[in-house]
Image (tube, grey):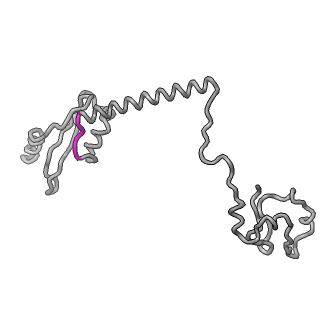
Amino acid sequence: MSKRLMERMLGMFRSRTQVGVDRAGNHYFSRVEEVDGAMKEKRWIEFKGDRDPTTVPVEWICWLNGQRKKAPTPEELAELEARRERVKQNVELLKKKEEEERRSGVRPVKTIGKTDSPNLRSFTQQFPGTSEDKKKEPEKVSKPNDVTDVEDARTDNDRSSEPTGTGASFKPGTWLPPS
């Protein structure tokens, strides 16, 4: 091995600073070293026992990735652990409550927003030719020459609620949605 590599490896063990320990016994370290001419902080973890990354708490993962500048304190870790425990208890309570509602067959119906459909009359009144008076009187529409009288034989009940016709018979504002 080269002399420089040996010095670097020995320096790695001498100049490391232990930043903290988590509940699983994993140790967290940092060291400032020169990388490409710039001084950068290197952070790493030494696992206790098996190398299981699932035992690393989120706060330490954020610190290792550089998303946090300061390492989590033991007080902060204890507070967050207590919060996680409260969330777990609340989830268990909600699951029990839902199970009881399922067994009894009584489930409250939750409605979101309006229960009635919107009233479009006020919206359609702002367009010319859509007043209620015109709705009561059937409007004469000029038909193109190629349309047969079979369409005239149909009553209003037979017609669909969707607008139909060709471009020649279209008049803006005459179609109203079914109420």
Q: In which quarter of the image is residue 49?
A: top left
| Residue 126 pos. (x, y %) | 69, 68
Secondary structure that dominates the magenta span: loop
Q: Quadrant of residue 84?
A: top left
Please name the residue shown 84% across and 64% down the image: 136
| Residue 94 pos. (x, y %) | 50, 29
Please name the residue shown 28% across and 34% down the image: 77
Left or right: 166 as drawn, with respect to 6: right
Q: Is residue 72 above or below residue 127?
A: above
Left or right: 54 as drawn, with respect to 179: left
Please name the residue shown 11% across and 38% down the image: 13
| Residue 33 pos. (x, y %) | 13, 49
Q: What stretch is highlighted in magenta?
A: 69-74
Q: In this view, does 47 lie above or below 175?
A: above
| Residue 172 pos. (x, y %) | 74, 71
Please name the residue shown 41% across and 32% down the image: 87
- Location of the N terminus (image quadrant): top left
Q: Is residue 55 magenta?
A: no
- Location of the C terminus (image quadrant): bottom right
Q: Quadrant of residue 162?
A: bottom right
